Image (spheres, coloured by chain):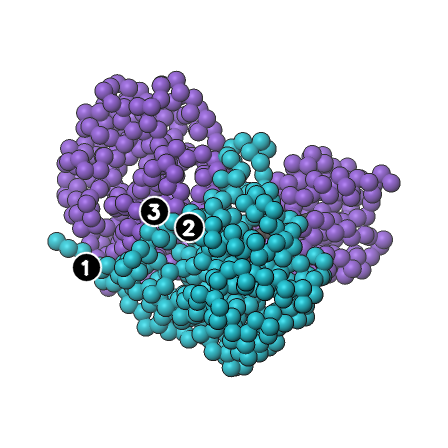
Chain colours: A cyan, B purple
Amino acid sequence: MSLKLQPKKWPGKIREVTLGAGNRQPRTVGGGNGLPLHTFEADFPHRPVLALEVTDINPPRWLDIVREPWEGLLGKPADAARKAAEQYGADLIMLNLMGTHPDRGGRSPDQAAIDVEAVLDAVRVPLIVKGPGAGAKQNDVLARVAEKYHGEGLVLHSACQEDYKTLAAVTVAYGHVLVSESPIDLNIAKQVDILLSDVNINLDRVLIDPLTGGLGYGLEYTYSVMERIRLAALGGDQMLNSPMICLVGEEVWKVKEVKVSERQEPRWGDQETRGINWEVATAWSLIEAGAEVVVLRHPDSLARVRKILDAWFAEGASNNTR
Amino acid sequence: MALTGLQIFKLLPGTNCRDCGYTTCLAFAMKLAAGQVSLDKCPTASEDIKATLGAASAPPIRGVTIGKGERAITVGEETVYFRHDKTFVRPTGLFRMIDPNRLSDGEIEKHLDDWATIGIERAGELFRVDGIAMIEPAGSRERYARLAEAISRRGMPVALMASTIDGVRSAVEKIKDQRPLIVPSPGVDQSPFVALAAEFKLPLVITGKDLDDVAATAVDAAKHGVTDMLLEPPAKDARELHQNLSRLRRGALDRIHPGLGYPIFLRVAAGEFDKVVIGITKFASLVAMENAAGEAWLPYWTLRQNIYTDPQKPLQIDPSVHSIGEPDENAPLLVTTNFSLTYFIVSTELDGTGVPSRLAVVDAEGMSVLTAWSAGKFSGEKVAKELRRLGATEHVKHKTVIIPGYVSVISGELEDALGDGWRVLTGPQEASDLNAFFRDVWQPMMNG
Ligand code: B12
Ligand code: SF4
């Protein structure tokens, strides 16, 4: 007897988006024609990639547990990026320009550009550049960076429904990749992609950020919204088939369950391992739901998720083994 | 052919006797049509309807109960591949494995005392160790029986991880009324275990070298009289585990083989954190794990809570003013939304400060603070109206209300809407900073 387990075929597939160009070693994500990680029945030319987050200033609210691996490098983005890529094995880097926020010192677009240049000089992996959050300042900062480092295929984070034109324009003009964000809402995700293609962005240059919540804080919603976005894409929706990016680290490392010490809550166990477990569990669930680019803060989390992916997508394994 | 709820309803007795657990025959018929219950729950159903509904009336995955009493756990009964289609209904049972070959009886008793009493509350759910998986001790049948009984005595469901048929029989004889789950070691001849499960009408784990083998063995066990089974797919690594879990669920839902319609059992060695994460997200019904401590259990429980929550209906609580400690008229008054998660987090934190206070939980349709605010359910005006409606404004003399830091923007509007000399104080963004806030802002303000 043999079970008739038919591989599930879908009319659509995920777009391939290449991150990094010019002096970067490019990295392509997407291209899968089946449900996330369903390597037994679909083809995945590229595996999910993992980024580590580095910051332009010494981040005021990071916990000691995530500061420790970056000892002496916080606020030194180039050195941190080098360590992330060379020692910690990050596939790419996310430079969080949090210091450009008016409440965090309000560094200028020119200062931001200096940071970006330093990181670009320090590493060859693709670079995600995250602005201070929607608004005029974000546009100034990211537009400046995009123009100055044209041709590097930077991933600009991010445009939203209310404010996308400036970033769309520089993405097209200078050959970058744009993240389109939407608050855990399939329809808005689609809407932003439509708006972007209306202003002539080739969607092969777009990633969707569904604005995830961390484990215990909204994952129950994000997980399904992402699955539904994936299903729509596989069903053939050309406006929802961009690869997805999730900023896991910043969601995880602020929640109570990673902040409380073992002394305060003996039942909760070792705080450091608990925090890393929290980040791994969030990251992995979101990869199950369809994330292709995952941004983490703790290098141990990256190492652990990477180990699973390495085994999963070992040589030849990305193709199916029906 | 699938029947509609109404068609099934016409075939039911129509007495609304409630024996099935539903208030009307119609409600039960709807559940039957959705494949969420099985017909045998209605004791008076006619042979006619049994024949009409036939096998199609059974849920695609059988419900299996392990244990007795308050802590008994039922797994299975799932009907969908994607939780947004109809939610997952039977949260993964998380069992703790004990290896008596490495521990003395005294140590085991101590662990059991401890694990039986763990209860961590989070967002309205009590996280507990759902059961104990006891490995068969080498050499002593009496010891296995004694240890199994020690677990049962504490009310916890038992999985008997058995390597010999004689060993497990002695344990089963001792606790057969407690519905233990029989789990033969992988690779052993399963037929004596099948006979034992059939004899005592107990649930049994079926293993196999691949899914074909598992399914065939399950069908064979059913022929020998075992009705309640869990399937254990091979899972040498994370990838194979994911593949087998996915294929098992799909095969069961598509009803491609009668041997697949059972819940899934998974055993996990120490340190295999990722396998448990995959198991919880992807369809495992019961996981027995070796040595894992709080730093692993807390994320497991929380992930399970997330995956088995219905995203269609946010859990909400009734709007009202909650007292933390015994607040007097000088105690702080705070406001938050009626999303259970938010309420739970804020009230726990307030409790932890030791400062008596009042927490006004306003109707925001069960949304988190920022979600509610963006949806217009937590505007200054709405909050003011709710505070008045709930009578929150009557309890305090200081006429000050503390709002969540994330919605500092509503403070002016709220002050205007409350009028009458009320002040709005913006609290911290994260509830975990409330302690510092009381110390550094609230108390100096009230004393000076
Ligand atoms: C899950 C989620 C949803 C779920 C709903 C969940 C729910 N029941 O509320 C869904 C998917 C339905 C949803 C919908 C929307 N969402 Co929403 N959502 C989230 C998400 C991911 C998590 C929210 C959550 O559960 N947080 C956990 C709870 C516990 O947090 P909390 O209530 O804020 O409580 C904390 C603090 O505020 C504080 N606190 C609480 N009360 C009090 C009281 C006092 C006195 C103090 C001092 C502190 C305090 O303590 C708690 C813990 O520290 C967040 C993003 C994020 N990562 O946080 C976005 C987010 C809140 N959503 C957002 C938006 C825009 C929306 C939508 C409007 C999008 C849309 N157009 O569809 C809709 C609105 C809903 C509608 N119209 O029906 C935005 C809000 C943007 C903004 N800055 O205003 C966010 C921030 C995402 C984003 N970055 O854009 N959302
Ligand atoms: S048990 Fe049968 S007869 Fe009684 S209410 Fe339920 S469906 Fe109707």
Dot in front, 2 or 3 = 2
Residue type marked 1: Lys
Q: CA distance from mark 2 to mark 3?
A: 20 Å
User: Whole-percent x and y of residue B199?
Assistant: 18, 32
Pick the residue in front: B24 or A4.
A4
Residue type marked 3: Ala
Q: Is residue B36 left or right of residue B173?
A: right
Residue B444 falls in which quadrant of the image? top right
Question: Callout 3: residue from which chain?
Answer: B
Label 1 sits on a secondary structure element that is loop
Give yes or no for contact between labels 2 and 3 (Cβ–Cβ under 8 Å). Answer: no
Q: Are marks 1 and 2 on the same chain?
A: yes
Q: Which residue is mark 1?
A: A4
Question: Callout 1: residue from which chain?
Answer: A
Name above or below for residue A313 compared with residue A25: above
Q: Residue at image x 50%, y 53%? A: A84
Rendered-image quarter of ligand 1: bottom right
Q: Which residue is mark 2?
A: A305
- Crowd around label 2: few <14 · some 14–19 · many ≥20 (10 Å): many
Give yes or no for contact between labels 1 and 2 (Cβ–Cβ under 8 Å). Answer: no
Tell me which numbered mark, 1 or 2, is placed earlier along the sequence: 1
Q: CA distance from mark 1 to mark 3?
A: 21 Å
Q: Is residue A302 left or right of residue B440?
A: left
Q: CA distance from mark 1 to mark 2?
A: 32 Å
Q: Residue at image x 20%, y 44%? A: B208
Name above or below for residue A65 compared with residue A32: above
Pick the residue in front: A199 or B386.
A199
Q: Which residue is mark 3?
A: B284
